[in-house]
């Protein structure tokens, strides 16, 4: 009878320890929690918006240079988002035990960092061109619009926009497009920074979230 009661007591104690122990982490239960799908989705939407806006600007005049119509920045962000979607779809394994998972996460981190630098570069270019176009003094010459910053300066640089039938398009619409590019690429830079930070945090666990230890004396799980 004594042994039966002792066995029953030990069984209850083991059951209590199992109930108090931390639940094992399910790798496939909430992959969206491990990698925020919203980041990749925002990168895709912003990339498409930047690309579409760049082609709208290019439709104003073919004289606009590539740095003034940053469709390349939007295309790069679309590629970054595709890597993010692929990272979301692969099976999550703790501690990066899969070489594919490690390579894709590293690639996504590098691409997010590159996208951040490119977006800030576009913001700088768009800000410069916005300030410049806001000060333009333009006049119509046939099918072209010729603009200068200062009419009184005989050696001032001349900006010739071909295929523009109305100079208001340059001093009004184009300036507004530059402002939109600044806002879109600034948002794009913030999203890329968030994506790179998430990958860095996931790799190095910069935030202390608590460690589960078991006390040998009380045989209880404690969180510290």
Image: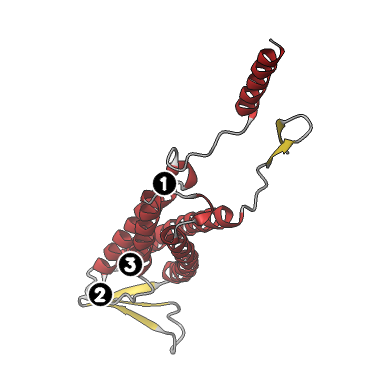
Q: Quick check: 142 left or right of 185?
A: left
Secondary element at image label 3: helix
Q: Nearer the viewer, residue 110 or 139?
A: 110
Secondary element at image label 1: helix
Of badges 2 and 3, nearer the viewer stands 3
- In primary-sequence order, the first of circles 2 and 1 is 1
- How far separated are the C-alphas under marks 2 and 1? 37 Å
Near mark 1 (Cα within 10 A), the count class, few <14, some 14-19 or many ≥20, is some
Q: Which residue is mark 2?
A: 62
Quadrant position of the N terminus in the picture: top right
Q: Residue at 48%, 54% (x, y): give it.
A: 191
Q: Position of residue 51 (x, y in %)?
A: 32, 62
Of badges 2 and 1, nearer the viewer stands 1
Q: Position of residue 119 (x, y in %)?
A: 46, 65
Q: Residue at 36%, 52% (x, y): give it.
A: 85
Q: Quick check: 96 left or right of 9?
A: left
Query: Residue furthest toward the top?
Result: 1
- Please say if 24 is above or below 114: above
Q: Which residue is mark 3?
A: 71
Q: Which residue is mark 1?
A: 37
Q: Position of residue 190 (x, y in %)?
A: 51, 56
Q: Quick check: 194 left or right of 7?
A: left
Q: What label does residue 120 carry, if any?
A: none
- How far separated are the C-alphas under marks 2 and 3? 14 Å
- Please say if 211 is above or below 61: above
Residue 132, image quadrant: bottom left
- Please say if 3 is above or below 134: above
Q: Nearer the viewer, residue 69 or 114?
A: 114
């Amino acid at each position: 009878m004594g042994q039966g009661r002792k066995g029953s007591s030990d069984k209850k104690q083991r059951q209590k320890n199992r109930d108090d122990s931390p639940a094992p982490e399910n790798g496939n239960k909430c992959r969206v929690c491990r990698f925020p799908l919203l980041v990749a989705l925002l990168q895709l939407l912003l990339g498409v918006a930047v690309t579409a806006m760049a082609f709208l600007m290019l439709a104003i005049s073919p004289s606009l240079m590539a740095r003034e119509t940053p469709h390349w920045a939007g295309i790069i962000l679309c590629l970054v988002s595709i890597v993010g979607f692929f990272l979301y779809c692969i099976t999550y394994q703790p501690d990066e035990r899969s070489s594919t998972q490690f390579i894709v996460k590293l690639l996504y981190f590098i691409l997010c960092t590159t996208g951040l630098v490119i977006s800030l570069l576009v913001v700088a270019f768009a800000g410069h061109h916005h300030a410049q176009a806001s000060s333009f003094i333009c006049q119509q010459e046939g099918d072209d619009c010729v603009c200068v910053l200062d009419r009184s300066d005989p050696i001032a640089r001349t900006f010739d926009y071909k295929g523009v039938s109305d100079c208001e398009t340059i001093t009004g619409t184009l300036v507004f497009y530059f402002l939109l590019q600044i806002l879109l690429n600034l948002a794009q830079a913030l999203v890329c920074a968030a994506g790179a930070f998430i990958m860095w945090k996931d790799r190095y666990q910069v935030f202390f979230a608590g460690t589960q230890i078991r006390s040998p004396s009380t045989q209880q799980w404690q969180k510290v």
